[in-house]
Image: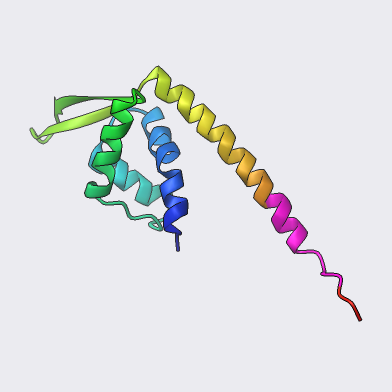
Amino acid sequence: MSSKPLVAAATKPLVLAILRRGENYGYQIIQKISEISGEELSWSEPMLYPFLQRLEKDGLIRSRWKIADNKRLRRYYRLTELGLAELENERLQWFKVQAYFKALLEEARRPIATER
């Protein structure tokens, strides 16, 4: 079960992390997200492609057209140096948030002091 706002916040680091592994076309990214999440996340092409266009406009990724093994023309995306730096920034931010949640959730496990 996934929360839409959380998934939306995680879209950029997830896509950048996948592209850090190498060049992919859009549908491959969708498949990898599904695989990595144990099929908890199910992205659609209408959701992903505008996002990829925005990342490209921001200079975080580049794309090129290439004929795939099945002779189909596909648009492949790859990470830029700026995208790699942004991925590192996103990674550090997520680790900070994770630490905050861990501290709060550990505290929530302690017994609550109540008045008698």
Q: With respect to residue 33, does 84 lie above or below? A: above
Q: Is residue 83 magenta?
A: no
Q: Tell which residue pokes out farthest to the top in this image.
A: 81
Please provide percent x and percent y for residue 40. 41, 58
Snapshot quadrant of residue 27: top left
Of residue 24 and residue 48, the one placed in the foreground of this image is 48
Question: In percent of the image, x 46 and y 27: which residue is there?
Answer: 86
**Magenta stretch?**
102-113
Residue 55 point in image, percent of width and height: 33, 31
**Residue occupying the point 28% across, 44% down:** 48
Q: Say if 73 sits above or below 99 in the image.
A: above
How many marks the image carries: the answer is 0
Picture coordinates of residue 105, whole percent (x, y): 70, 57
Task: Quadrant for residue 107, please give it.
Answer: bottom right
24 left or right of 115 in image:
left
Locate residue 16 relative to residue 114 in the image: left or right: left
Location of residue 99 by image quarter: top right
Quadrant location, the N terminus: bottom left
- As drawn, the residue found furthest toward the right would be 116
What residue lies at 8% left-to-right and 32% top-to-bottom? 71
Q: Is residue 18 left or right of residue 66?
A: right
Residue 110 lies in the magenta-colored region: yes
Give the vertical position of 102 relative to 76 (above or below): below
In the rendered image, the vertical position of residue 2 relative to residue 59, given as above or below: below
